[in-house]
Amino acid sequence: MEIKIQALKKNYGQKTALDNISLTIENGMFGLLGRNGAGKTTLMQILSTLRKPTSGKIIFNEIPLEDTQKIRPLIGYLPQEFSLYPDMSVLEIMRYLAALSNLSAEVQRQRIPDLLQRVNLWENREKKVRKLSGGMKRRLGIAQALLHDPQVLIADEPTVGLDPQERLRFYALLNEFSSNRIVIVSSHIVSDIETVCEKVAVLDAGKLLFTGTVEDLAQTAAGKVYELTVPKSRQASIQNEYCVLSSQGHLADVKIRVLHDSEPTVGDPVTCEATVEDGYMEMLRQLEQGVKK
């Protein structure tokens, strides 16, 4: 499966939500990274045929997005906020949604147990939805999105509200399903994308700032990350002068990681290996400075 997005634009009145987005997405885990309001949800809703673009093209394996009768069976969508009937059991929900998808009884008998086992909910199949934990509801969301065996799974900020352990389990599950399909995941948390995605796109204010591998994103900050050691009394001035990535106190001194185009003249600078988060912050720093590559 391959998705080609060409010169995509989306306007809401005078506001531009997506501005000339072009990228290609192939099988595997693909991350959409950006701050809140960057345009991630709008792009996912367009890919899911829930919204129409203002202009541009999207093609799924030579099938245009406008051909919704062919496109919708290809897509499974897990929105950031979704509701299920609270008094129905897990099994009842799956059967109900399978019926809405016109799945035959034979397919339901095979697919529903298989999916619930794969998302580790089979033992809880009789439990009411209202009694499920946040992580269990998210796993049920994946199962329902995969009922019709889509070739593309789209998950918008899927780990919101989950604890760190649940997040790891959830992404491991998505990674498993990505072996033979496209899985698109959006997040504003860099570590989430870095952990599971090979390729990533960075959006901000509706513009595409970067697309490539997570390693390439890290490399955008290569040679620009330094660790400074300064007295605590200098911490405030350093924060005013430099783009601070993190800081850690050590008795009278503070170790501060900063982004800077050249070696700082204070704090006995030590060059650090750039991380994916450093690369992301460098993209935002360039944007704020009005620097274009």
Image (tube, helix red, strand yellow):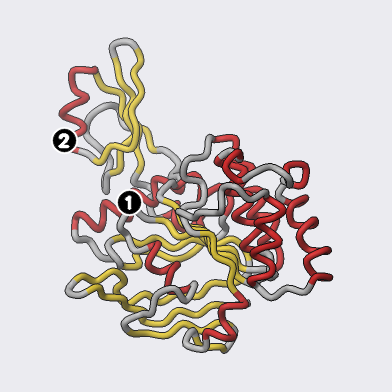
Q: Identify the residue under disc 2.
A: 240
Q: 249 or 262, which lies in front?
A: 249
Classify residue 149 as left or right of residue 213: right
The location of residue 25, given as percent across then percent down, is 53, 72
Q: Which amino acid, by three-letter code, is at mark 1?
A: Glu
Under tag 2, what secondary structure? helix
Q: Which amino acid, by three-letter code, is at mark 2?
A: Asn
Q: Which mark is residue 282?
A: 1
The location of residue 117, given as percent across then percent down, is 77, 50
Under tag 1, what secondary structure? helix
How busy is the neighbourhood of tag 2: few (under 14 within 10 Å), some, or many (20 plus)? Answer: few
Q: 225 or 175, which lies in front?
A: 175
40 versus 271 height, above or below: below
Classify residue 128 as left or right of residue 44: right
Q: Mark 2 to mark 1: distance in Å?
A: 17 Å
Furthest-top residue in this view: 251
Which quarter of the figure is the C terminus placed in? Answer: bottom left
